[in-house]
Amino acid sequence: MGKLAEGSSIPPSSSVGKAIVDEVRQSPILALIIFVPVVIVLERLTPDAHTLLFLLSVVAIIPLAALLSRATEAVAAKTGDAVGGLLNATLGNLTELVISLAALQAGQYLLVKASIAGAIVTNTLFMLGGSFLLGGLKHHIQEFNRVNARFQACMLFLATIAVLVPSLISEVDQPPAPEVSQTLSLGLSILLIVVYALGMFFSLRTHKELFASVSHSGEEEKPWPMTLALVLLVVVTLLVALVSEIFVGSVQVAAEHLGMTPAFVGFIVVALVGAAAEMTTAFSAARADRLDLSVGIALGSSAQIALFVAPLLVLVSYFIGPEPMTLQFWRGAVTMMIVATLAAAFLSNGGRGTWYAGIMVLALYGIFAFTLFVLPPARPS
């Protein structure tokens, strides 16, 4: 990494250039950044090549996720793992939000709800399980702040209950009129956003001492200068949003050509692509014996999607959707979210992580993914 000029907080251009070259040498995956302009240009020239655009957009998001990961780690080194995890979850969920907004505007509510449920399950099971596995393969036993993990798991549980209620009333003998479900979902959405805001105030202001990171002895890479990290966060986030729009525009047709259902695409594919940036950071942090950051990203991202992104989409649907969206999910999605939340609660009890715990969580995610692939759920009413 290039050093800062004496007495300046802004790295000189030569240092920035050297930093970029060094990063590419250390992480050859960053060479895939060339696919970002390729997919943008191709979308302008051949917008009907949906399958090719879908595949290229997935590849293009990978190096952007890696850059976002390194920049977020640099900020987390200055602010601490609690704030760093929240920052990474927020920026990572921006991709989910862009994808969902595009689908919402097109009236693809099944895709929106599948991506929301899938993001919660993917972050809670796949990301958390992968972090335990990758970190446990390098470190015998890893410790994390279980107070923080339990707090995030409780917030996630609250959100799943809020999703469960409108889903349950649709299953009674005399289901209420659609207007009742819309009103209930609107009220619950406002309540969840308020609870999420108060939760952030609790963890970052009034009781932040409870969320301090557990000390670790792992070797850390030298962080980027703060100015460089913040600039890259902004630029890469914008590029991720741009590539995500291309991804949304091509995913449905490409899914049909590749033999995937809309539910599987939303629950698995969109969720994995949307969480690529967060996963990169969570996995690398676990390998560096910073399981606090990994757990904070995985559970924090799930809680943010459930308590903020999903309710926000309900509110926005009144303005850009063909009709208001509700928090009513199909039974299978609600079941998977509840099981994922319970798994997160069990994992957070001990405050320790091992590789086999990761295997069990990943196996649970594999059960859900395979079930959706061979037996997609029916469209919810």
Image: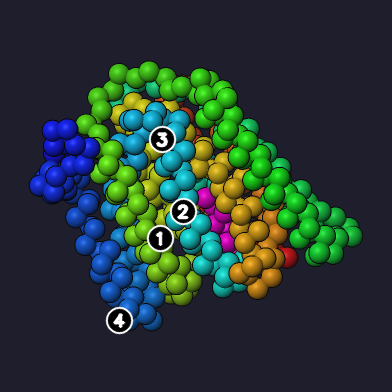
Q: Residue at x 50, y 47 (%)?
A: 122
Q: Which mark is residue 11?
A: none
Q: Find the magenta span and give its range.
A: 110-119
Spatial CA span between label 4 and label 3: 39 Å
In contact (CB < 8 Å): disc 2 and disc 1: yes
Q: Residue furthest right?
A: 174
Mark 3: give few (<14), some (14-19) or many (20+) Cα within 10 Å: many
Pointer 3 residue: 84
The three-letter amino acid code for the residue at tag 4 is Leu
Residue 353 versus residue 258 in the image, above or below: above
Question: Quick one: 179 or 351, which is closer to the camera?
Answer: 179
Name which of mark 2 and mark 3 comes first in the sequence: 3
Q: From this view, report whether residue 65 is shown above or below residue 200.
A: below
Q: Main secondary structure of the magenta part?
A: helix
Q: Nearer the viewer, residue 21 or 260?
A: 21
Q: Decide whether residue 117 is among the magenta residues.
A: yes
**Badge 2: how crowded within 10 Å, few (<14), some, or many (20+)?**
many
What residue does disc 1 label? Answer: 241
Mark 4 and mark 2: Cα distance apart in space: 27 Å
Residue 94 has which mark? Answer: 2
Compute the Cα span from label 4 to label 1: 20 Å
Amino acid bearing label 1: Ala
Q: In the rendering, at what x and y percent does residue 352 appear?
A: 46, 21
Q: Tell me which label, 4 or 3, sits earlier in the chain.
A: 4
In the image, taking residue 201 as reference, residue 259 lies left or right, namely: left
Lower position in the chain sequence, tag 1 or tag 3: 3
Q: Is residue 1 left or right of residue 190?
A: left
- Considering only order in the chain, which callout, 1 or 2, is on the residue closer to the N terminus? 2
How far apart marks 2 and 3 lie (CA) works out to 15 Å
Q: Quadrant of residue 229?
A: top left
**Residue at the disc numbered 4:** 45
Judged from the image, the secondary structure of the residue bearing numbered disc 2 is: helix
